[in-house]
Amino acid sequence: MKNTRFPSCISAVAASTASKTKSSKRGFTLVELLVVIAIIGVMVGLLLPAVQAAREASRAMSCKNNLHQIALATENFQLANKCYPPARYQPRPGDPDSNDCGGSETTWLVRIMPYMEALSVEQQWDYGLAYGDHPEDVRTKSLPAYACPSRRSGGDMVGLGNLVTGSTNWVTLPCGCKYPIFNAGGSVTGAVGDYGANHGDLSPGSSGLPTDFYYGGNGTGIIISSRPNCINGKPVNWRDRISSKQVFDGLSNTFLVGEMHVPIGKLKQSPEDAFIFNGDNLYNFARIGGPTVPIAKDPRALGNDLVQWGSWHVGYCQFAFADGSIRAVSSSIDTDTLGRLCNRNDGLEISAID
Protein backbone atom coordinates (compact mmCIF):
# COMPACT_ATOMS: atom_id res chain seq x y z
CA MET A 1 0.00 0.00 0.00
CA LYS A 2 1.43 3.37 -1.02
CA ASN A 3 2.18 6.04 1.59
CA THR A 4 0.72 9.24 0.23
CA ARG A 5 1.96 11.38 3.16
CA PHE A 6 5.57 11.72 1.88
CA PRO A 7 4.78 13.83 -1.22
CA SER A 8 2.73 16.19 0.88
CA CYS A 9 5.60 16.56 3.37
CA ILE A 10 8.04 17.26 0.56
CA SER A 11 5.67 19.85 -0.82
CA ALA A 12 5.42 21.52 2.58
CA VAL A 13 9.21 21.67 2.98
CA ALA A 14 9.60 23.12 -0.53
CA ALA A 15 6.95 25.72 0.16
CA SER A 16 8.66 26.68 3.41
CA THR A 17 12.06 26.99 1.69
CA ALA A 18 10.61 29.13 -1.07
CA SER A 19 8.98 31.36 1.51
CA LYS A 20 12.31 31.81 3.33
CA THR A 21 14.13 32.53 0.10
CA LYS A 22 11.55 35.10 -0.87
CA SER A 23 11.73 36.79 2.54
CA SER A 24 15.59 36.87 2.49
CA LYS A 25 15.54 39.17 -0.57
CA ARG A 26 13.75 42.01 1.16
CA GLY A 27 15.44 45.54 1.22
CA PHE A 28 16.53 47.80 4.12
CA THR A 29 13.87 49.14 6.34
CA LEU A 30 13.66 52.91 6.83
CA VAL A 31 15.11 52.57 10.34
CA GLU A 32 18.10 50.60 9.08
CA LEU A 33 18.74 53.17 6.33
CA LEU A 34 18.63 56.03 8.82
CA VAL A 35 21.09 54.20 11.08
CA VAL A 36 23.53 53.74 8.20
CA ILE A 37 23.24 57.41 7.23
CA ALA A 38 23.85 58.43 10.84
CA ILE A 39 26.97 56.25 11.05
CA ILE A 40 28.32 57.74 7.80
CA GLY A 41 27.62 61.23 9.14
CA VAL A 42 29.55 60.52 12.34
CA MET A 43 32.48 59.14 10.35
CA VAL A 44 32.55 62.21 8.10
CA GLY A 45 32.39 64.45 11.15
CA LEU A 46 35.37 62.65 12.64
CA LEU A 47 37.37 62.78 9.41
CA LEU A 48 36.61 66.41 8.46
CA PRO A 49 38.90 68.07 11.05
CA ALA A 50 41.72 65.77 9.98
CA VAL A 51 41.16 66.69 6.33
CA GLN A 52 41.06 70.39 7.19
CA ALA A 53 44.22 70.07 9.28
CA ALA A 54 45.99 68.31 6.41
CA ARG A 55 44.94 71.06 4.00
CA GLU A 56 46.16 73.79 6.37
CA ALA A 57 49.45 71.96 6.86
CA SER A 58 49.87 71.92 3.08
CA ARG A 59 49.05 75.64 2.85
CA ALA A 60 51.49 76.44 5.66
CA MET A 61 54.20 74.51 3.84
CA SER A 62 53.49 76.47 0.66
CA CYS A 63 53.68 79.70 2.68
CA LYS A 64 57.03 78.57 4.07
CA ASN A 65 58.26 77.89 0.55
CA ASN A 66 57.15 81.38 -0.55
CA LEU A 67 59.16 82.92 2.27
CA HIS A 68 62.16 80.82 1.30
CA GLN A 69 61.97 82.08 -2.29
CA ILE A 70 61.67 85.69 -1.15
CA ALA A 71 64.54 85.36 1.33
CA LEU A 72 66.78 83.73 -1.27
CA ALA A 73 66.00 86.44 -3.83
CA THR A 74 66.69 89.16 -1.25
CA GLU A 75 70.02 87.59 -0.31
CA ASN A 76 70.99 87.32 -3.98
CA PHE A 77 70.14 91.02 -4.39
CA GLN A 78 72.39 91.75 -1.38
CA LEU A 79 75.25 89.76 -2.85
CA ALA A 80 74.95 91.50 -6.23
CA ASN A 81 74.54 95.04 -4.83
CA LYS A 82 76.54 94.75 -1.59
CA CYS A 83 73.43 95.80 0.35
CA TYR A 84 69.83 94.82 0.91
CA PRO A 85 67.16 96.50 -1.23
CA PRO A 86 65.66 99.72 0.12
CA ALA A 87 62.12 99.21 1.35
CA ARG A 88 61.25 102.42 -0.55
CA TYR A 89 62.50 105.95 -1.15
CA GLN A 90 61.53 108.23 1.75
CA PRO A 91 63.16 111.62 2.48
CA ARG A 92 63.31 113.07 5.96
CA PRO A 93 61.72 116.42 6.78
CA GLY A 94 64.33 119.12 6.36
CA ASP A 95 66.56 117.14 3.99
CA PRO A 96 68.64 119.11 1.48
CA ASP A 97 67.51 119.17 -2.16
CA SER A 98 70.00 116.41 -2.98
CA ASN A 99 67.92 114.02 -0.82
CA ASP A 100 64.52 115.70 -0.78
CA CYS A 101 62.56 114.03 -3.56
CA GLY A 102 60.36 111.01 -4.13
CA GLY A 103 58.41 109.09 -1.53
CA SER A 104 55.71 107.54 -3.70
CA GLU A 105 57.74 105.25 -5.96
CA THR A 106 57.70 101.44 -5.89
CA THR A 107 59.03 99.06 -3.23
CA TRP A 108 61.61 96.39 -2.50
CA LEU A 109 59.26 93.63 -3.69
CA VAL A 110 59.78 94.83 -7.26
CA ARG A 111 63.56 95.12 -6.92
CA ILE A 112 63.99 91.44 -6.01
CA MET A 113 61.92 90.17 -8.94
CA PRO A 114 64.93 89.52 -11.22
CA TYR A 115 66.14 87.04 -8.59
CA MET A 116 62.77 85.28 -8.64
CA GLU A 117 62.87 84.58 -12.38
CA ALA A 118 60.61 87.56 -13.07
CA LEU A 119 62.99 89.97 -14.81
CA SER A 120 60.43 90.77 -17.51
CA VAL A 121 57.95 91.92 -14.84
CA GLU A 122 60.53 94.05 -13.01
CA GLN A 123 61.64 95.76 -16.23
CA GLN A 124 58.19 97.32 -16.63
CA TRP A 125 58.76 99.45 -13.53
CA ASP A 126 60.53 102.83 -13.40
CA TYR A 127 62.10 103.37 -9.97
CA GLY A 128 62.06 107.13 -10.44
CA LEU A 129 58.38 107.28 -11.37
CA ALA A 130 55.50 107.52 -8.89
CA TYR A 131 53.60 104.28 -8.38
CA GLY A 132 50.33 105.77 -9.59
CA ASP A 133 51.90 106.93 -12.85
CA HIS A 134 52.51 103.36 -13.99
CA PRO A 135 49.91 101.68 -16.24
CA GLU A 136 47.25 99.54 -14.60
CA ASP A 137 48.55 96.32 -16.16
CA VAL A 138 51.92 96.99 -14.48
CA ARG A 139 50.44 97.85 -11.07
CA THR A 140 48.24 94.75 -11.00
CA LYS A 141 50.80 92.18 -12.17
CA SER A 142 52.30 90.20 -9.30
CA LEU A 143 53.95 86.89 -8.45
CA PRO A 144 52.12 83.90 -6.91
CA ALA A 145 54.93 83.64 -4.33
CA TYR A 146 53.73 86.92 -2.79
CA ALA A 147 50.44 85.30 -1.65
CA CYS A 148 49.99 83.06 1.40
CA PRO A 149 47.57 80.27 0.37
CA SER A 150 45.98 80.26 3.83
CA ARG A 151 44.74 83.76 3.07
CA ARG A 152 44.31 84.03 -0.72
CA SER A 153 45.19 82.31 -3.99
CA GLY A 154 48.01 83.44 -6.23
CA GLY A 155 45.46 84.35 -8.88
CA ASP A 156 43.40 86.62 -6.62
CA MET A 157 45.81 89.42 -5.76
CA VAL A 158 44.24 92.60 -7.14
CA GLY A 159 42.61 95.09 -4.77
CA LEU A 160 41.04 98.51 -4.89
CA GLY A 161 42.61 101.41 -3.04
CA ASN A 162 43.60 105.05 -3.05
CA LEU A 163 46.61 106.98 -4.19
CA VAL A 164 47.75 109.79 -1.93
CA THR A 165 47.97 113.53 -2.22
CA GLY A 166 50.81 115.59 -0.80
CA SER A 167 49.08 116.56 2.44
CA THR A 168 49.34 114.42 5.57
CA ASN A 169 47.09 113.58 8.49
CA TRP A 170 48.46 112.06 11.69
CA VAL A 171 46.72 109.27 13.58
CA THR A 172 47.65 107.66 16.89
CA LEU A 173 47.46 103.86 16.82
CA PRO A 174 46.89 101.73 19.96
CA CYS A 175 50.66 101.10 20.09
CA GLY A 176 51.12 104.78 20.90
CA CYS A 177 52.56 105.44 17.46
CA LYS A 178 51.84 108.77 15.88
CA TYR A 179 51.60 107.60 12.31
CA PRO A 180 51.32 109.59 9.06
CA ILE A 181 48.29 108.86 6.89
CA PHE A 182 48.30 110.67 3.58
CA ASN A 183 45.08 112.12 2.25
CA ALA A 184 43.53 109.85 -0.34
CA GLY A 185 43.31 110.62 -4.00
CA GLY A 186 41.36 108.74 -6.66
CA SER A 187 40.70 105.00 -6.37
CA VAL A 188 42.79 102.67 -8.52
CA THR A 189 43.55 98.96 -8.72
CA GLY A 190 46.83 97.35 -7.74
CA ALA A 191 48.44 94.13 -6.55
CA VAL A 192 48.10 93.14 -2.89
CA GLY A 193 50.02 90.48 -0.98
CA ASP A 194 51.01 88.96 2.34
CA TYR A 195 54.74 89.34 3.01
CA GLY A 196 56.44 92.41 4.40
CA ALA A 197 59.96 93.60 5.09
CA ASN A 198 61.31 93.78 8.62
CA HIS A 199 61.55 97.53 9.16
CA GLY A 200 62.61 97.18 12.81
CA ASP A 201 61.10 98.24 16.12
CA LEU A 202 59.76 101.47 17.60
CA SER A 203 62.99 102.55 19.27
CA PRO A 204 63.69 105.44 16.83
CA GLY A 205 60.37 106.92 17.93
CA SER A 206 57.03 107.71 16.35
CA SER A 207 55.99 111.19 17.37
CA GLY A 208 56.09 113.23 14.19
CA LEU A 209 59.83 114.03 14.33
CA PRO A 210 62.40 113.58 11.53
CA THR A 211 63.91 110.76 13.62
CA ASP A 212 60.76 108.59 13.43
CA PHE A 213 61.12 105.00 12.28
CA TYR A 214 59.29 105.39 8.97
CA TYR A 215 61.61 108.08 7.53
CA GLY A 216 64.63 107.22 5.40
CA GLY A 217 67.58 105.69 7.24
CA ASN A 218 65.85 105.48 10.63
CA GLY A 219 64.57 101.91 10.57
CA THR A 220 66.29 99.43 12.89
CA GLY A 221 65.42 96.42 10.71
CA ILE A 222 67.16 95.10 7.61
CA ILE A 223 65.00 96.23 4.67
CA ILE A 224 64.35 99.85 5.63
CA SER A 225 63.15 103.06 4.02
CA SER A 226 66.04 105.01 2.51
CA ARG A 227 66.68 108.63 1.68
CA PRO A 228 66.97 109.01 -2.08
CA ASN A 229 69.82 110.60 -3.98
CA CYS A 230 68.14 113.10 -6.27
CA ILE A 231 69.02 114.61 -9.63
CA ASN A 232 66.74 117.36 -10.93
CA GLY A 233 64.16 116.50 -8.30
CA LYS A 234 63.99 112.82 -9.26
CA PRO A 235 65.33 109.86 -7.23
CA VAL A 236 68.08 107.97 -9.02
CA ASN A 237 69.36 105.63 -6.25
CA TRP A 238 69.37 105.33 -2.48
CA ARG A 239 71.62 106.64 0.26
CA ASP A 240 71.01 104.45 3.33
CA ARG A 241 72.44 101.03 2.57
CA ILE A 242 72.24 98.08 4.96
CA SER A 243 74.44 95.06 4.31
CA SER A 244 74.75 91.73 6.10
CA LYS A 245 77.85 93.08 7.88
CA GLN A 246 75.62 95.62 9.64
CA VAL A 247 73.36 92.98 11.14
CA PHE A 248 75.45 92.92 14.32
CA ASP A 249 72.99 90.85 16.33
CA GLY A 250 73.51 87.92 13.97
CA LEU A 251 71.72 86.82 10.83
CA SER A 252 70.08 83.91 12.67
CA ASN A 253 68.70 86.28 15.32
CA THR A 254 67.11 88.88 13.06
CA PHE A 255 63.97 88.83 10.95
CA LEU A 256 64.30 89.55 7.24
CA VAL A 257 60.73 89.05 5.99
CA GLY A 258 57.49 87.92 7.61
CA GLU A 259 53.75 87.63 7.25
CA MET A 260 51.88 90.92 7.49
CA HIS A 261 48.71 91.08 9.57
CA VAL A 262 45.63 91.57 7.36
CA PRO A 263 42.34 91.23 9.30
CA ILE A 264 39.72 88.76 8.12
CA GLY A 265 37.04 90.67 6.27
CA LYS A 266 39.51 93.29 5.00
CA LEU A 267 41.07 91.45 2.08
CA LYS A 268 41.68 93.65 -0.96
CA GLN A 269 40.56 96.72 0.98
CA SER A 270 42.86 99.65 1.64
CA PRO A 271 44.49 100.51 4.00
CA GLU A 272 44.38 97.16 5.82
CA ASP A 273 45.29 95.21 2.65
CA ALA A 274 47.13 97.82 0.61
CA PHE A 275 49.18 97.82 -2.59
CA ILE A 276 52.46 96.01 -1.91
CA PHE A 277 54.26 97.78 -4.75
CA ASN A 278 53.24 101.26 -3.63
CA GLY A 279 55.84 103.09 -1.55
CA ASP A 280 53.69 105.95 -0.29
CA ASN A 281 52.92 104.32 3.10
CA LEU A 282 55.12 101.93 5.05
CA TYR A 283 52.27 99.59 6.00
CA ASN A 284 51.87 98.63 2.33
CA PHE A 285 55.04 96.54 2.27
CA ALA A 286 56.65 96.33 5.77
CA ARG A 287 55.99 95.73 9.46
CA ILE A 288 57.53 96.45 12.86
CA GLY A 289 57.40 94.62 16.19
CA GLY A 290 58.21 94.92 19.86
CA PRO A 291 56.68 96.31 23.06
CA THR A 292 53.19 97.74 22.30
CA VAL A 293 53.34 96.11 18.82
CA PRO A 294 52.86 92.34 19.33
CA ILE A 295 52.18 89.75 16.67
CA ALA A 296 48.44 89.72 16.04
CA LYS A 297 46.90 86.78 17.92
CA ASP A 298 43.46 87.11 16.34
CA PRO A 299 43.14 87.22 12.53
CA ARG A 300 40.14 89.53 13.01
CA ALA A 301 42.00 92.03 15.20
CA LEU A 302 41.96 95.70 14.26
CA GLY A 303 43.94 98.54 15.79
CA ASN A 304 47.66 98.04 15.22
CA ASP A 305 46.88 96.06 12.07
CA LEU A 306 48.59 98.66 9.88
CA VAL A 307 52.01 98.03 11.41
CA GLN A 308 52.04 94.59 13.08
CA TRP A 309 52.96 91.10 11.99
CA GLY A 310 50.30 88.40 11.81
CA SER A 311 48.98 85.42 9.86
CA TRP A 312 45.92 83.26 9.33
CA HIS A 313 47.77 80.18 10.61
CA VAL A 314 46.46 79.18 14.01
CA GLY A 315 48.75 80.28 16.82
CA TYR A 316 51.85 81.25 14.89
CA CYS A 317 53.31 83.54 12.23
CA GLN A 318 56.05 82.50 9.81
CA PHE A 319 59.27 84.46 9.24
CA ALA A 320 62.34 84.26 7.06
CA PHE A 321 65.42 85.10 9.12
CA ALA A 322 68.41 86.87 7.62
CA ASP A 323 70.38 83.60 7.55
CA GLY A 324 67.78 82.15 5.16
CA SER A 325 66.06 79.90 7.71
CA ILE A 326 62.26 79.86 7.87
CA ARG A 327 60.68 79.53 11.30
CA ALA A 328 57.21 79.61 12.77
CA VAL A 329 57.07 82.04 15.69
CA SER A 330 54.34 81.81 18.31
CA SER A 331 51.79 84.62 18.15
CA SER A 332 52.15 84.82 21.94
CA ILE A 333 55.88 85.52 21.88
CA ASP A 334 57.12 87.96 24.52
CA THR A 335 57.13 91.42 22.94
CA ASP A 336 60.60 92.25 24.28
CA THR A 337 61.96 89.22 22.45
CA LEU A 338 59.96 90.18 19.37
CA GLY A 339 61.52 93.63 19.38
CA ARG A 340 65.00 92.13 19.62
CA LEU A 341 64.28 89.90 16.63
CA CYS A 342 63.21 92.97 14.66
CA ASN A 343 66.19 95.15 15.64
CA ARG A 344 69.38 94.30 13.78
CA ASN A 345 71.70 96.08 16.22
CA ASP A 346 70.32 96.34 19.76
CA GLY A 347 73.00 94.09 21.25
CA LEU A 348 70.46 92.29 23.43
CA GLU A 349 70.35 88.54 23.93
CA ILE A 350 67.48 86.63 22.34
CA SER A 351 65.52 84.41 24.71
CA ALA A 352 63.39 81.44 23.57
CA ILE A 353 61.74 82.18 20.20
CA ASP A 354 59.01 79.55 20.06
Image (spheres, rainbow, N blue to C red):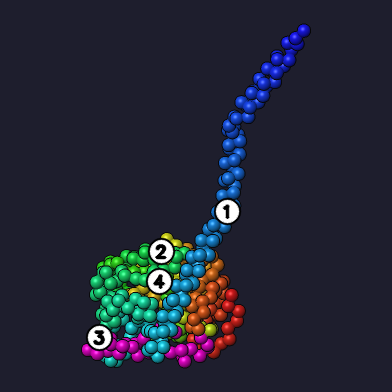
Name the one closer to the observer, 143 or 283.
143
Q: Mark 2 highlights which residue?
A: 153
| Image: magenta residue range | 222-251
Q: CA distance from mark 2 to mark 1?
A: 25 Å
Mark 1: which amino acid?
Leu
Q: Nearer the viewer, mark 3 or mark 2?
A: 2
Query: Depth check: 86 or 10 in front?
Result: 10
Q: Are marks 4 and 1 in contact (CB under 8 Å)?
A: no
**Where 283 falls versus 36 (above or below)?**
below
For the point 63% across and 29% down, which residue is it? 24
Specify which label sits upstream in the sequence, 4 or 1.
Answer: 1
* Residue topped by disc 4: 146
For the residues labelled 3 and 2, the Cα–Cα distance comes to 36 Å
Dot 2, how many residues are within 10 Å of its Cα: few (below 14), some (14-19), or many (20+)? some
Q: Which mark is residue 234?
A: 3
Q: Crowding at label 3, few (<14), some or many (≥20) Cα neighbours within 10 Å? A: some
